[in-house]
Amino acid sequence: MSVGIERLRELMAEALALAERGRFRVEPNPCVGALVVSSDGEVLGRGFHREYGGPHAEVHALADAGESARGATLVVTLEPCAHDEKKTPPCVAAVREAGIARVVVGSPDPNRATTGRAAAALAAAGIEVEEGVLGEECRLALRHYEAHLARGRPWVIAKWAMSADGRVADAVGRSRWITGAAARDLVHEIRGRVEAIVVGRGTVEVDDPQLTCRRPDGPALARPALRVVLDSRLGVPTTARLLAEPDAAPTLVIATSASDPDRRAVLQAAGVEVAVVAADEDGRVDPRAAWELLHARGVRRVLLESGGRLLGTVLRVSGAQQIMAFTAPVVIGGEPARSPFAGDGWPMSSAPRLLSPRVTAIGDDALLEGYWPALPA
Ligand code: AOF
Ligand code: ZN
């Protein structure tokens, strides 16, 4: 007996709902959900892609099903990966080894390295493959992923933490701590799952951050994130912890050609890497050039933890892809206390509104997340 199409559609809808649980944690990778199902349509295992760099949905579902996966059907929203150039081993091998008899796929993988390869690889192993179940819905769930594949830049997550009245620091610039321990812990987790953390020189001067993942189990990716300072004129003090503690993680300072070569030499002698990129019309590091440089170095995912000036520039000229805005139950007040952005904003009628917004309580704080909309040129 094999599961009929009506039941398969229901199961695929459940897998899609599971996939959603990874949203805002797996990007730029796809949100994927998977179920292991018995021949009479009973769910034996569930899984979804939970975290960037973590196991794929199929692997979680197979582990959840355990031995019962032998002879069962795998229902998965995205074609299983069959290519090797990845952080994790290909899922087709895991599917084969688990003894799955039939794979039901929602959408093909838009990633050309693997598109269409699952069907052939699975069929060669004697596994039955069925494609296109809730295909349209599954493809829609991959929109951000598909757009990103064509972009050739890192996925930029802009994060800020503010008071209930929208301030990121008090009148003299103090910001420790606006959010509570749970929110700060989540930020450390995200730091452990990006390839670069970016700030401007202003943040280094005011906050003197370490920009490391301080969790007991350390960063989840193989290497700690590169700490990046955008510093057009190389004014960053060598006493800053980012530079003075080079063993914690590598640091890259990105400047423009207007920076002083002697200063460059001083930083390099202190063990800091300095790169020079194009300036924008204000003579500051053009964030687009910085993204290109980082992308060329294999950085796929960036956490932008900058202050108002850089954040304002980035959002105006290049956009971020994802926003994480924490709001804490504290009121700072006063005109001089800064908001997350400097510079010009947008008129209300054309102010960017986040796509797929989601609000979550993190301890006593609220976390608003969403995708940054593509702005008109
Ligand atoms: C995911 N999650 O559940 C599935 C993916 O860099 P890696 O090893 O995480 O591999 C990413 C690629 O794996 C991705 O571009 C897509 O082609 C494939 N499938 N990816 O992140 C998943 N099933
Ligand atoms: Zn996979």
Image (cartoon, grey):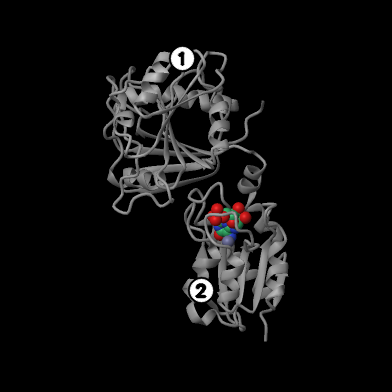
How packed is label 2: few (under 14 Cα within 10 Å), some, or many (20 or more)?
Answer: many
Q: Which mark is residue 259?
A: 1
Question: Which quarter shows the C terminus?
Answer: top right
User: In this rendering, is residue 363 above or below 1?
Assistant: above
Task: Please tell me which residue is depicted at 46% across the width and 44% down the height of the picture.
Answer: 194
- Residue 217: % across, % down: 32, 54
- Residue 272: % across, % down: 39, 29
The disc labelled 2 sits on which kind of residue?
Gly
SS of the residue at dot 2?
strand
The disc labelled 1 sits on which kind of residue?
Ser
Q: Are marks 2 and 1 in contact (CB under 8 Å)?
A: no
- Residue 140: % across, % down: 66, 52
Q: Which mark is residue 336?
A: none
> Visible in this render: residue 252?
yes
Task: Please tell me which residue is depicted at 49% across the width and 53% down the height of the picture.
Answer: 53
Q: Quadrant of residue 7?
A: bottom right
Farthest residue to the bottom: give it. Answer: 1
User: In this rendering, is residue 199 above or below 300?
Assistant: above
Task: Please tell me which residue is depicted at 52% across the width and 16% down the height of the picture.
Answer: 257
Identify residue for label 2.
45
Which corner quadrant of the figure contains ligand 2?
Answer: bottom right
